[in-house]
Image (cartoon, grey):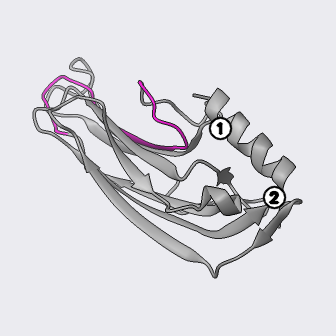
Amino acid sequence: MPAGLKQTSSPIQISAAVSESAPNTLTTDTIDLNLNALDQEVFVVTQVNIDVDAPDSVLATTTTVDATLSTVLRTSLGSIADANVLASSRRAIICNAAMSPDGGIPFDREDPTFTALSEDYLGIVATSNCFLNIAGVNNGNAKSARVRVYGYRAKADASVYAALVQSEVLSA
């Protein structure tokens, strides 16, 4: 348990899905965590599972489908290199016409059950929402992603809560 937090719920699983509004278009869905700001409630994320659709197989073209789970509303997909991105997933079909003229080679880059290894948690959400983002590249059809977020609710003391909210807002 992180210092300054007191667990107030049993483990919780929250599921959500998002579909691109048009092929290859960044689309975001808000996941409402129903946190009570008056009680300085936060959501401690312990595990994330993101599942994305397979990209289209397009002759001599590399196609991808990427999804991220972020703690703030983003204007780009982002990656786990960004402090406000908790997890990401990628599926790609890599195609080089000279090497493979009849099709591509599919690859997955995902953390199907991404869990904290050396810490008790992956991240802490203090502002009541997190966001599931998706964007494809070179696909002819709109793609979808699904996420399951595992964690628990906790009450933060005043100084920890203020620091978490400020950090989350400033990372946008």
The answer to which image quadrant residue 2 occupies is bottom right
The answer to which image quadrant residue 40 occupies is bottom right
Give the position of the C terminus as an image quadrant: top right
Vertical side of 24 occupied by 107: above or below: below
Is residue 63 inside the magenta stretch?
yes
The furthest residue to the front: 38
Is residue 118 inside the magenta stretch?
no
- Residue underneath mark 2: 118
- Specify few, some or many for label 1: CA neighbours under 10 Å numbering under 14, 14-19, or 20 or more: some
| Amino acid at the residue labelled 2 | Ser
Mark nearer the viewer, 2 or 1: 1
Q: Position of residue 74 (x, y in %)?
A: 45, 30
Residue at x 46%, y 35% (from the top left corner):
73
Earlier along the polypeptide chain: callout 2 or callout 1?
2
Question: Would residue 64 be found to the left or right of residue 97 on screen?
Answer: right
The reply to whether discs 2 and 1 touch (Cβ–Cβ < 8 Å) is no
Residue at x 54%, y 53% (from the top left corner):
128
Secondary structure predominantly adopted by residues drawn in magenta? loop
Q: Position of residue 132 (x, y in %)?
A: 40, 46
Vertical side of 60 occupied by 162: above or below: below
Q: Look at the image and give the residue range highlighted in magenta.
A: 56-75
Give the position of the N terminus as an image quadrant: bottom right
- Residue underneath mark 1: 168
Vertical side of 96 occupied by 5: above or below: below
Choose between 139 and 163: the one closer to the eye.
163
